[in-house]
Image (spheres, grey):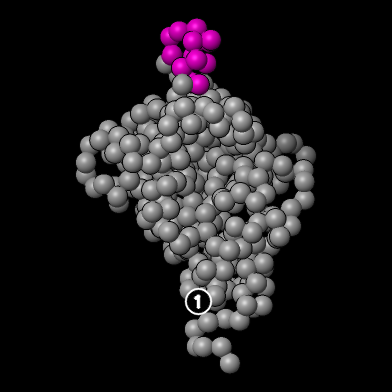
């Protein structure tokens, strides 16, 4: 018989495969038109096996939920709203479903990364603090016991934000030359660079120069965002060396991170913090720009704050 507290290899493999199978419908992929199979994710199977074999609670880490976009054309304000509430609820339910397969359960550490690049995305640090604090409060209010929030304050305490950023960048970020070479040679990195450049340009509301000058500035800032994002990922790995790594960005099959979709959206890059939510007449919740949502529906308040939009019902 196997020692107490361990699980036989075939059982471990079956359990890990069942968990990946559970995640597949929610995968955010760089190749969404190509069907994916469990065997395409050896990295995640290995990460899961580390927990399943010893009968421990599975720990997922998810960098994201940084802060709201500074563009009023996209979002309702600087605090979490219905988009975050629905996304957090989904993540908590996902952990509950994993617990049906693996009884020790699962939890997700949301690694809120706003302070890492707040200066580059032009969001004030006090807005980022308020967003992260409200995110944690929302988790408590909704009873989402499988979720917790980890941010730069958990690592470097009350140091000035600029000093925190500088320390993390110096310790973990790839060089600009290294990153530029990767953008030239790797399609997924190039797609990420282009996606971030597009978001930065779309989020900039106070630029007084030409469109071409804005593009040049956003390309420069995009490199910085990717450098800091990589640095944050390395810091997370150091603080959570045993975890199953999730990502809100589309990921290719076989990547070290598993891309996870939070809510329906027309664009695979859309997140709750770059948009607002429209509750459609058929019951679906969809992420979109605030300017589009308010054309299609009426605003709804939750706890005296703008929350989302309720779609107008067409006359029967």
- Residue 23 vertical position relative to residue 271 in the rendered view, above or below: below
Decide which of 63, 312 is in the foreground and name it.
Answer: 63
- Write the residue at 48% across / 60% down: 243
Q: Which residue is mark 1?
A: 54
Q: Is residue 50 magenta?
A: no
Q: Main secondary structure of the magenta part?
A: helix
> Range of the magenta residues?
207-219
Identify the residue at horizontal 37%, vertical 32% (top origin).
Answer: 118
Q: Residues within 10 Å of mark 1 (few under 14, many from 20)?
A: few
Q: Quadrant of the N terminus?
A: bottom right
In what element is the residue under mark 1?
A: loop
Residue at 26% of width from left, 47% of height from top? 156
Q: Is 124 left, or right, of 37 in this rendering?
A: left
> Residue 91 in the image: x percent, y percent?
54, 56
Return the x and y of residue 193 as percentages of the image width and height.
Answer: 55, 29
Residue furthest to the left: 159
Q: Is residue 243 above or below residue 8?
A: above
Which corner quadrant holds the C terminus?
A: top right
- Side of 25 relative to 112 (left or right): right
How far across and how far down the image is residue 176, in percent? Answer: 44, 28
The answer to which of 188 and 157 lies nearer the viewer is 188
- Estimate the x, y position of residue 238 in percent, counting from the top left: 38, 54
Q: Magenta segment: does it hold 208? A: yes
Can residue 114 be seen here? The reply is no
Residue at 27 percent across and 33 percent down: it is 162
């Amino acid at each position: 018989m196997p020692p107490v507290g361990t699980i036989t290899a075939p059982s471990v493999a079956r359990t890990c495969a069942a968990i990946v199978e559970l995640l597949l419908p929610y995968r955010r992929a760089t190749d969404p038109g190509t069907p994916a199979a469990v065997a395409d994710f050896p990295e995640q199977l290995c990460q899961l096996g580390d927990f399943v074999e010893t009968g421990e609670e599975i720990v997922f880490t998810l960098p994201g939920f940084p802060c709201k976009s500074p563009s009023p054309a996209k979002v309702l304000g600087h605090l979490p709203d219905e988009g975050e509430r629905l996304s957090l609820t989904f993540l908590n339910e996902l952990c509950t479903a994993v617990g049906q397969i693996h009884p020790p359960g699962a939890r997700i550490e949301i690694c809120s990364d706003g302070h890492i690049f707040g200066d580059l995305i032009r969001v004030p640090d006090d807005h980022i603090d308020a967003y992260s604090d409200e995110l944690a409060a929302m988790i408590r209010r909704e009873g989402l016991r499988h979720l917790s929030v980890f941010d730069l304050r958990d690592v470097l305490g009350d140091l000035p934000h600029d000093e925190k950023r500088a320390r993390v960048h110096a310790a973990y970020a790839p060089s600009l030359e290294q990153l530029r070479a990767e953008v030239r040679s790797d399609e997924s990195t190039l797609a990420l660079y282009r996606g971030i450049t597009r978001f930065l340009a779309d989020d900039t509301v106070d630029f007084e120069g030409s469109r071409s000058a804005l593009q040049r500035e956003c390309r420069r800032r995009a490199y910085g965002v990717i450098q800091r994002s990589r640095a944050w990922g390395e810091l997370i790995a150091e603080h959570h060396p045993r975890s199953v790594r999730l990502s809100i960005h589309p990921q290719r099959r076989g990547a070290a991170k598993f891309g996870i979709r939070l809510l329906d959206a027309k664009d695979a890059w859309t997140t709750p913090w770059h948009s607002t939510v429209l509750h459609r007449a058929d019951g679906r919740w969809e992420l979109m720009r605030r300017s589009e949502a308010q054309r299609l529906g009426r605003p709804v308040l939750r706890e005296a704050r703008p929350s989302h939009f309720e779609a107008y019902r067409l006359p029967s």
